[in-house]
Amino acid sequence: MEAEGLDVLFLAPSADLEYLTGVERHIPSFGEASYAHGWVTGAFFRREGEPVFVLPRMFAAFDLREEPPGELVVVNETDDGFAAFERTARGLGANSRVAVGDRVWAETVLNLGRILGFDNLRTGSRLVNDLRRVKSAEELEAMGRAIVTVEKTMAAVAPLVVPGATTAELVEAVEHELRAAGSRCPSFPTHAFTGLDERDLDSQTATGRDPIPEGTSIMFDFGGVVDGYCSDFGRTVYCGEPPADYREIYVIMLAAQEAGRAAAAAGMPAREVNAACRRPIEDAGLGEHFRHRMGHGIGLDVHERPFISPEDETPLEPGMTFTDEPSIIIPGRFSVRIEDIVVCEEGGGRKLNSYPAALVANA
C-alpha cells in the first residue's frame, strides 16, 4: 500500500478478506442472500493498525464464526447505514486514497466515492493477489487435503461410466462422493461431458438425462474445498473398448501435460509454459483441437492469477500453484482431457496429485 501511495484498502467478504483475517466466505448459492445495509459489509485496512470491520447486525450475529481481528462496527437494521459507513471511512482520513477489492458491491464503491471523492478510488485486489499467489507450506498442505477429496471421488465414480448411465447421474455421484470424502462443497459447478458438437452429452444441458452409448469418452471436471482451499481436477473415462486413434491421442495429451509441468520452472513466463504445453499437440497436427489454455492459478479461489495462457507474461515464482489441463476435443470423433495441480519449483513444476493418469476404459 505504501509503494502504491494508498492509505486504505476496503475488502468485502471474499478470498482476499479470508486470506488476511480468517473471516470465512459463504458457500456460493444460486440466489443472492441479502441483509438490510448489506452493502456496508467488509473491512477497512490501514498501513498501520488493525482492520476496522463494518457489518450489518445479521451478518455479525449469524455469519461470523468468531470475533474478527481489529475494531468492529455493527450496523443495526434501523440505523442510518450510510451515516455509520461515512463515520468509519472519514475516521480513517478525510482525503484517503482508497483501494477497493474486486468483490465489493457497486453501491459500496459509489458511496465511498461520494464520501472520499471518486478521484481517490483505485482497484485493490491485485495487492492481495501478489501475496496470495505464492503458497506457504501450510497452504500447500490444505490444497493437498482438497486434492485427496477429488481423487477419492474419481476412484469411486470412474467405474460408473457404463452404457446407459447419464452424465447427470455421474455428476450426482461426484458431488455425493466429494462430501463423503470431506469436501465442504464443490469448488465450482461439477461437469461431466463429451464435448462433441452434434452428439454432445453434457450434464449442464438437457442432454444430461440421455443415456451414454458405448464408444463414448466422458470428460470429468470438478473440484473440492478443504479449509478454504480449492482443488480442480479432470480425467477422461472411455465407455467401451477404445479405438487405436483414441489411444494415440490420449498419449499425445499426456505428453502435453508433462511438457507443461516440466516447463513450469521459476522465472519462466506463464505464456511460455502455456506454449510448452501446447507444443506436443500442435506438433501432432491437432493444435486447432486444443481450444483451452494450459491452466490458471489456484488456491483460496479456484481461478486465480496468474493465468497459464498466451496473454500472461508473469514470471513464475517458487510456490505458485496452478492447473495443468490440456485437452483435445475433435468434433464428431471423441474428446480427451486431464487436469492436475502443479506447484512451481526451481527446476520445474511438481505435481501435487497422485491419481493415475493412465487411460481408463470400462469395456
Image (cartoon, helix red, strand yellow):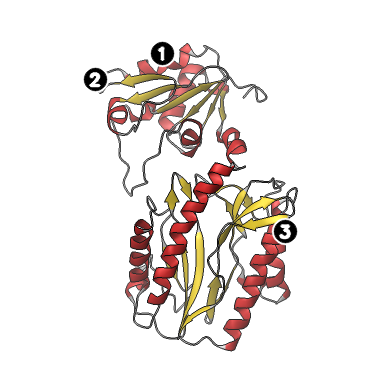
Quick one: label 2 or label 1, which is nearer the N terminus? Answer: 2
Amino acid type, label 2? Thr
Task: Give the label, 3 or 2, closer to the camera.
Answer: 3
Amino acid type, label 3? Ala
| Residue located 45% across and 60% down the image | 150
- What residue would you read off at disc 3? 263
Q: Quadrant of residue 224?
A: bottom left
- Marks 3 and 2 sit apart, C-alpha to C-alpha, by 58 Å
Badge 3 vs badge 2, beta-carbon distance below 8 Å: no
Q: Quadrant of the C terminus?
A: bottom left
| Residue located 27% across and 21% down the image | 76
Depth check: 28 or 255 in front? 255
Res. 302 mark? none
Quick one: label 3 or label 2, which is nearer the N terminus? Answer: 2
Could you say where residue 276 lies in the image, as x and y percent from the top left?
72, 62
Res. 78 mark? 2
Badge 2 vs badge 1, beta-carbon distance below 8 Å: no
- Relative to 105, residue 152 above or below: below
Amino acid type, label 1? Arg
- What residue would you read off at disc 1? 87
